[in-house]
Image (tube, rainbow, N blue to C red):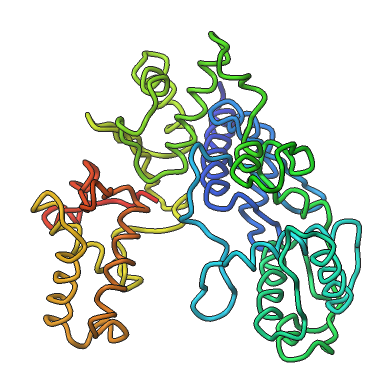
């Protein structure tokens, strides 16, 4: 192969690796928000589509003319660590009312290329009144108008909705606010990543758990009773989904089929090949695996990190939990109190007894999200991955998420 040919092969390999990691961090990627990354994904769209389908069974759609790429990531387990968040200061997670309004607003926007905030609010009022399963929407309530605005702002952030005249936040203060919207109905439809569309559900609305289960059914794997290819395919996809989506994968967390596939010669070979093609480093231990992105492109949350009080406290608690083998919440509250006494000028918002418990809960939440601790009969216990973050080895720890 000529020198030019080698350079082209290397360039493609590097762009594919970057595209994989960019899409993992931003499953909805737009040309407007990240033009350089979108251009890479657009150029390598065919290869990236095959890559995600082969390893994960995830669908990638690249709409070059519309200026977006959508990776429909399907998780193997339900995970509440990535809630939708409000756009205001504090970025509090969405509550049930806001999720309901988000779904109703999205449904009402379909087939409406242009609308105003007042017309949309009226349609949401009517839709909620017509369906007994939905709570009523009262535009006279400031709190409900704020929830409505939070849903709209989320859709604006996703670029499915654009305010071409006026400001969405103005509706909080007055229902007479004038805001004109342009709707991208195609992108709006792409937001749902569930393999079974909501319109195809057969379970009754009175059984939300059954409807949620039905949303996640993937026909390509059959009923689960088939053998051979379908069972192997399902095990492979579930394994790689966890490796690419979770900070760490412990062997104890895998099903028998997933563990058998990961331990097979084919599985081990594919693990190494996928890591190399994605530009990541595969760390394999007796207890499990994790994929490390040396460049942090696929990392949306970092640990260790001094960017928040919760993550700083999490590191301090982790050292204590790992040292004693486990701790009950009261012991962790005491550890937070000791940390506050040592550094009285730090985390002033938590410098009281109630604040100690709140910071403890936030710190434990960080550790749970990173797979570094688990609950066991009321005790917070360190997982094997916690050994990477001891005080002695902290300078060598690399980002895992």
Q: How many marks?
A: 0
| Extreme residue toward the top, this view | 228
Q: Position of residue 279 (x, y in %)?
A: 44, 39
Tell which of 349 and 213 is nearer to you: 213
Q: Position of residue 302 (x, y in %)?
A: 37, 58
Q: Residue at x 86, y 79 (%)?
A: 118
Q: Nearer the viewer, residue 223 or 66?
A: 223
Along the viewing direction, whichever of 186 and 176 lies nearer the viewer: 176
Q: x, y percentage for residue 290?
A: 34, 38
Would you place residue 391 above or below residue 168 in this image? above
| Residue depicted at x 75% and y 73% | 137
Q: Nearer the viewer, residue 2 or 242?
A: 242
Residue drawn where x is 55% and y is 31% of the image? 56
Establish if 232 lies above or below 31.
Answer: above
Q: Give the x, y percent position of residue 200.
A: 78, 37
Using residue 338 as the reference point, say whether residue 201 is left or right of it.
right
- State the residue lying farthest toward the left: 324
Q: Quadrant of the N terminus?
A: top right
Q: Quadrant of residue 211?
A: top right
Residue at x-position 48% and y-position 40%: 77
In the image, taking residue 238 as reference, residue 149 lies left or right, namely right
Could you tell whether 218 is left or right of 373 in the image? right
Q: Is residue 295 above or below residue 121?
A: above
């Amino acid at each position: 192969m000529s020198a030019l040919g080698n350079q082209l092969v290397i360039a493609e390999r590097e762009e594919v690796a970057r595209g994989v990691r960019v899409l993992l961090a931003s499953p909805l990627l737009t040309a407007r928000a990240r033009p350089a990354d979108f251009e890479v994904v657009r150029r390598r769209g065919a290869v990236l589509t095959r890559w995600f389908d082969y390893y994960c069974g995830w669908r990638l759609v690249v709409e070059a003319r519309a200026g977006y790429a959508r990776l429909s990531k399907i998780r193997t387990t339900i995970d509440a660590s990535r809630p939708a968040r409000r756009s205001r200061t504090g970025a509090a997670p969405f509550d049930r009312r806001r999720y309901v309004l988000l779904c109703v607003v999205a449904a009402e926007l379909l087939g409406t290329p242009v609308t105003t905030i007042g017309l949309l609010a009226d349609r949401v009022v009517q839709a909620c009144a017509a369906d007994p399963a939905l709570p009523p929407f009262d535009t006279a309530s400031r709190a409900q108008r704020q929830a409505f605005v939070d849903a709209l702002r989320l859709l604006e952030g996703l670029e499915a909705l654009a305010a071409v005249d006026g400001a969405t936040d103005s509706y909080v203060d007055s229902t007479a606010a004038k805001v004109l919207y342009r709707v991208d109905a195609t992108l709006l439809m792409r937001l749902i990543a569930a393999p079974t569309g909501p319109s195809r559900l057969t379970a009754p609305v009175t059984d939300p758990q059954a409807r949620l289960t039905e949303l996640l059914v993937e026909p390509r794997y059959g009923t689960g009773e088939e053998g051979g290819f379908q069972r192997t395919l399902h095990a492979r996809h579930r394994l790689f989904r966890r490796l690419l989506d979770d900070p760490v994968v412990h062997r104890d967390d895998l099903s028998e089929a997933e563990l058998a596939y990961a331990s097979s010669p084919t599985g081990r070979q594919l693990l190494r090949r996928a890591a190399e093609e994605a530009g990541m480093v595969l760390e394999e231990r007796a207890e499990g695996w994790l994929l490390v992105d040396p460049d942090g492109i696929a990392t949306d949350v970092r640990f260790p990190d001094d960017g928040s009080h919760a993550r700083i406290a999490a590191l301090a608690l982790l050292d204590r939990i790992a040292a004693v083998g486990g701790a009950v919440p009261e012991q962790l509250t005491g550890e937070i109190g000791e940390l506050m006494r040592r550094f009285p000028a730090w985390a002033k918002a938590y410098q009281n007894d109630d604040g100690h418990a709140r910071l403890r809960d936030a710190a434990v939440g960080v550790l749970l999200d990173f797979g570094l601790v688990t609950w066991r009969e009321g005790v917070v216990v360190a997982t094997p991955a916690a050994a990477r973050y001891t005080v002695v080895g902290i300078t060598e720890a690399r980002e895992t998420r």
